[in-house]
Amino acid sequence: MAAESAVAPKRAPQKPGAIAQLRHAFTGLRREETIAGYLFLLPNLVGFIVFMLFPILFAFYIMLTDWSLAKAPEFVGLKNFETMVNDRLFWKSLGNSFYYTFVAVPTGIFIAFWLALALNRKMRGIIFFRTVYFLPQITLTVAAATIWRWIYQPEIGMINHILEIFGIDGPKWIHDTKWAMPSVIIMSNWQGIGFAMLILLAGLQGIPEEYYEAASIDGASGWQRMRYVTLPMLSPAIFFVVVTSLIGAFQSFDQFYVLTEGGPAHATTPLTLYIFQNAFSFFKMGYGAALAAVLFVIILIITIIQWQLARRWVFGFEEDE
Amino acid sequence: MIRKIAFLMTILALLSFGFAASAQDMTDWTCGTVDGDMAGAITITGWEGPGEVDKFLLAFDEFFGEYYPNVEQILNTGVNWGDYWTTLPAQLAGGAEIDMAWMHDTRNDTFAANGWALNLDSYLESCPIPGWPDKFVASQVDAFNYQGSQYAIPYDLAPGGLYINLDLFEEAGLEPPGEHTSFEEFTELAIALTQDTDDDGDTDIWGISNLVSVGRGAGGAYWIIKSFGGELFNEEITSSVMNSPETTAALQWMADLLWDSGAHPTAESIAASGFTTEFLFANGNVAMHYALNDAASRMWELAGDSFNWTVVPTPTGPAGRYNFIGGSAFSIPTSAAHPDLSYELIRFTLANPDHLCRTAAMGAALVSQSEFHNCAAPDDAPYADAYHEVFSVIGARDGVHPPYHSKYLEWESSVWVANMDLLWTGEERDASVVVQRAHDQTNELLGG
Amino acid sequence: MATASARKGSLFGQKQTKILTDLVLYVVLSVVGIIFILPFAWMVANSFKDIRGIYTYPPTFIPEVWQPENYVEAWTMTYFDLGFLNSAIVAAAVVLGQLFTASLAGYAFARLRFPGRDKIFLLYISLMMLPFIVLMIPLYVQMRAFGWVSTLQAVIIPFLFTPWGTFMMRQFMVTIPRELEDAARIDGCGFFRTYWLIILPLTKPALATLAIFTFVNTWNMFLWPLIILGKPKVKTLPLILASLQNQSGMRTPWHLIMAAATFVVIPVLMAFVLGQKYYVRGIVTSGIKGGG
């Protein structure tokens, strides 16, 4: 229900009953639009029902079972959720997921935003630079992890080599339980920034030049143009990047898997990796699915909160329907 | 190298053909339960990829060519090790019919306990494998035995040993360690060989490497614990006994190599390359390198004869001599469509003397049939004699593996690695602290 | 800072300021760019080394022994060319399918009014929130029921539908000025024609972005193909690459893997550079003038 109020128009003139609303939708002027709307959604809905509905229902069922994958699932009710309460690795990996998400996402988006602004300029060779910043996305992950391990190597590695020039004794990076997570965050931002940058860049390209011209004629300063043209017009793209980055960060797996394998001492084991281990190494698929449900609920709550907040700042949400 | 192997193969193939011509008339390698005209497909999956798996593929082809010409082999080999252990359970859980699957000792009990792997006892009884179990290496037969039943047949063994840079020993005027070297003597050697050649305060040559590694399972420490007289679990594997003074002393000895004497590179030093830790030895930066037998061929490729090197046995402890052995096996999933055929194939692959020497020679590891151990190292390799002595004779004799059980993987990840990593990263340097915590958590896991 | 003043320069049209900011920007972008390009360059450098060069300690960047024949060897590896073809088929099909389904749904969610729209939207994007790990096995069961195990359609058809892409298309379509559409509607265009003739051309940067991302993701898709594609002949490139690095292996041919990985990147790189064409020809500059 929160979802409904989150996306409902702000100034709904009157609130007719749902049935009346439906009847209204299928009659008169709106009829054609309603039918068109559902038709446009049809390919996605069919795809969803055919390919996702069964797996999702199944996942929701097995979280209530003990399932070793080999034998038939055994119904245990909420036992898996009770187990979680005293599972120290669950709490640790949950904490790691939060740590990772709430550091990696804001820093990543901040950098990507400025990078996108810089790369939005019309200048010679800009495509080359865009490609450079996108390269990490397409570099073989194993190759990337290998070089990052070298970069992080405390004795001969690149970072500590540079720090040494400034007289700083660098940390042990991925070999230190406190520094391992920041190390993963740096690498995954390096890899992921191209994605956010590209979306924001596409958003910037979509802002009509006329808006800037009008603002200039009104005597707006650079900052004012940023505040009153760029940010509002870019807000749907920013919102998209924020929402999907948060979802993506909570679900990230690869960078942990290849760089640190969750170590040392589980310092970089996020919930996804723990789910993965439970499902495929410990053969506790039921427990894994229950953990996944927790992750799902967390992401859902965070997304709904963002939706609520979106009305205040995102273009296209306050639109009157 | 490839050409050498090919040449060797050709010779061996010719030889085995010679023998085969006379031998095959006498032995029928089927068990009589499958129709020779059977048509259909057999699905085989494993992690070994091109180069390694060829030795088995040749045997598979021989088997089907001879007995079941109408059967098609669907081979899904070369699935990267880490991925294999996701793929196999997922496919089996999804209902895939897999007839034969590569199995590893660390996973056997989990697969057996959860009903994934077929109990092979009745097969072993009705159609015995020649030489089973006497000619197979005992610790590996045991590693794939769960609660008294056999769930997989081992095809290799991977014993640990010490790779020795003879030049560094000669420079230091020291003798390489041997089978009877004690852990104290070993420590002294390691310290004496550790050097800072350019006096910049950083070690350039380490006495010993790869004895300790962040994230490594219990197999890497278990033989040391046993040598010190310690243990991990009680006999029934229902509770922990790892807080004993002996187990603690063994782990403290390992930690001291890192943090006390500095004779062992710390985790960050060996992680300089993302590939393997062998490069340090191959580059002449290490006097003694702990590794399994399969490292020999890599060392030969990496280091070649750029310096003199050999292999020697690991030390002997106050409680005797124990040698780590790991290894792999062939198993039949319970969902197999043609389990009888799979069993015949395994039997042929692991016991037919006509090809076993070839099979052993083509792999980095040994075939677990002890009779063929001397085929394992290529004759032209300078390390062949030492390899044979250290791994096939001494290693196989003293072989020991951690007490595997149905929750072994979970225990290794959530208890062992979680605590021992603190010791290997230097966050905690007192072994008794981590051992006590691991002890309590083990009891929690095994009791729960 | 550099970027804020950059905007100013370009708008005020002062040539000197622009050249200066451009210069500063070039320097900054180049310095930061080195970090971004380094691992890629390292991968390419390693693809020219021999196996010993790869294991040199400490690692060196420039190959001591140049071995360009790694590329020939990589290309002639078993199933490599077939894997290339399989990957190309999968990527092309998924990209086209997603562009179509996501832009259709995105348009409906952004522009059309119908009951339950926003609820369906939130429900649809919440599909992104369930980790794929727990959906994998039931999806495998389903693929078996369809008889699609070890076929390419198993990695194509379930992935033609995308909440992520739909969300993205919606976000871009809400910024399109409504006047354009209204004009088309008044001219008697139906909803589909409006979508096809007005909206799609105006969302080229977004479509290009979606195409690039779908291409990259599909090209690199690993876990699902690994599990569902059990036969060598249907395997995609990442699976073939991964099979070369068998951990228990005797000798992982890293020089060949790096050469193969460089091969693998080339189509993605080309897709990216081609996609850039649609970035420059942005939306409304052509749109408003054409439509208005």
Image (cartoon, coloured by chain):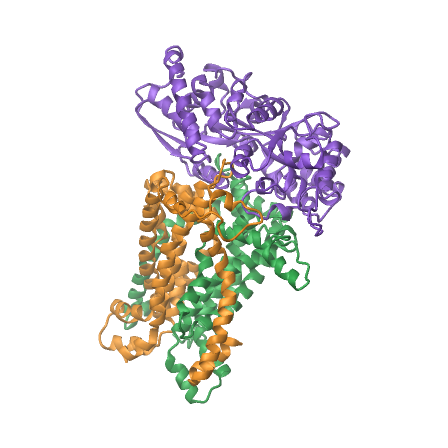
Chain colours: A green, B purple, C orange
Task: Using the rendered view, name the quadrant where residue B290 is placed.
Answer: top right
Q: Residue furthest right?
A: B245
Q: Is residue B121 above or below residue A304?
A: above
List x then y, in percent, for residue B76.
Answer: 40, 35
- Nearer-the-camera pick, A167 or B65: A167
Residue B389 x/y as whole percent: 60, 23
Task: Give the residue displayed 50% in from the left and 22% down from the top.
Answer: B375
Number of labels in the image equals: 0
State which quadrant residue B219 falls in: top right
- Can residue A139 be seen in this snapshot? yes
Name of the residue lying farthest toward the bottom: A218
Is A86 left or right of B335, judged from the image as shown? right
Name the residue nearer the viewer: A95 or A133.
A133
Residue farthest to the top, as pictured? B26
**Residue A1 visible in the picture:** no
Quadrant containing the C terminus of chain B is top right
- C113 left or right of C16 in image: left
Q: Is residue B309 above or below residue B149?
A: below
Relative image position of residue B214 (x, y in whole percent): 63, 44
Vertical comparison of A86 with C207: above or below = above
Q: Is residue B22 left or right of residue A66?
A: left
Which image quarter holds the N terminus of chain B?
Answer: top left
Give above or below for C68 relative to C196.
above
User: Which of A224 and C187 lies nearest the eye of the viewer?
Assistant: A224
* Residue B321 on image: x %, y %: 69, 25
Q: Relative to the observer, which residue lies in front, B236 or B202?
A: B202
